[in-house]
Image (spheres, grey):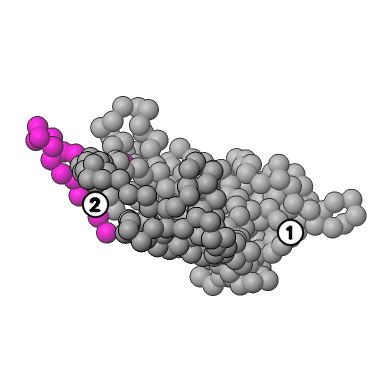
Amino acid sequence: MTTKTTNDLDGNKVSSSPLLLATSSPPYLSCQRLVTKDGHCALRSSPPSPGLWPSWASASAWLLALQGHVVCVKHITSFTAAFSFSLETQLTIGYGTMFPSGDCPSAIALLAVQMLLGLMLEAFITGAFVAKIARPQKRAGAIQFSPQAVASPASCFRATNLLRRPLVDVEVSAVLYEEKDDQVLHQTNLDFQLDQLGPRPCPFFIFPLTFYHVLDRHSPLYPALREGSASHFELVVFLSASQEGTGDACQKRTSYLRQEIQFERRFVPAMGLDKHGRYQVSSQHFGMAHCKEPLDKECVVQINGDGSDRME
């Protein structure tokens, strides 16, 4: 899938993608992105023009009012009485003191519109309440990504579950948005794996996980990361999981630019043992990375790519 450029009135090329602005825009626009770090869409659209229908509606209302005044609702003398009549109508109380006149068809039409809007409002509130209980939207907010990714010899990033309630069937996908020399926005899928699971989903997510993508000459990310490459790219990561109790799906997104990928580094182990010999997650070491060093000769416990059984 590609996004082509168009020409403006002066004959200059104008891009329809914010990524294509990186090479010709001022320096402060070089960090523009499609997806923010917290997963929200960064695209904005211009507001539509209001048109002429408000003016026509106002003029029509004044013309109807000039034809002759008819009392549409009997015994309404103040705003409080009108509000009371509206409540009686909506709740079908009907005390009988105030009632619409049959000589005013607009009052009957307005009464029907109020009843329809009231039923729609009740259905919306009930549906929103049920959806909030059945599928809480804040569950995806408990998933956190590492602020930066590392590349050596594979491109890696971390994800952690901030709540003690586990997630199941975790799947990760990524899309590389890249602008090449032909001034066209290219989109390429990248495969990220977790240890030896391969493309299969992770069955249990309660501690930090490190996902990696092998950087070889067959990787679409390899040409973009090599030295001397002037192309601007954005790596968008999608993490989908299911809740253990209800089975409802949730998704969290983030993105990484070129300056957010650290080369020749590896993540610091984020899991270790406390004084009682139990596994403990260190939030301070979650997003930390240090220079790549040779592995120690001593035996270490590999836990989802996090390294050893002790904190460093």
Q: Is any atom of residue 20 visible in this view?
A: no
**Image coordinates for residue 227, horizontal then vertical, percent:** 38, 40
Q: Position of residue 285 (x, y in %)?
A: 69, 44
The N terminus lies in which quarter of the figure? bottom left
Using a 10 Å C-alpha cutoff, classify the residue at mark 2 as few (fewer than 14 neighbours), some (14 to 19) or many (20 or more): some
Which residue is rendered at x = 30% and y = 41% of the image? 47
Residue drawn at x 20%, y 49% as measured from the top left: 4
- The x, y position of residue 7, in whole percent, is 13, 40
Q: Is residue 284 visible?
A: yes
Say what amino acid the circle numbered 2 marks.
Thr
Is 41 inside the magenta-drawn segment?
no
The type of residue carrying mark 1 is Arg
CA separation, marks 1 and 2? Answer: 42 Å
Pointer 1 residue: 164
Task: Please say whether residue 15 is one of the residues in the magenta stretch.
Answer: yes
The part of the image, by quadrant, that contains residue 110 is bottom left
- Check disc 1: other Cα within 10 Å, few if <14, some if 14-19, many if 20+: few
Q: Is residue 7 above or below residue 270?
A: above
Q: Quadrant of the C terminus?
A: top right
Q: Which one is in front, 219 or 121?
A: 121
Q: What secondary structure is found at the residue carrying circle 1?
A: loop
Q: Earlier in the sequence, mark 1 or mark 2?
A: 2
> In this picture, which residue range is highlighted in magenta?
1-19
Q: Which residue is mark 2?
A: 3
- Residue appearing at x 54%, y 43% in the figure: 80
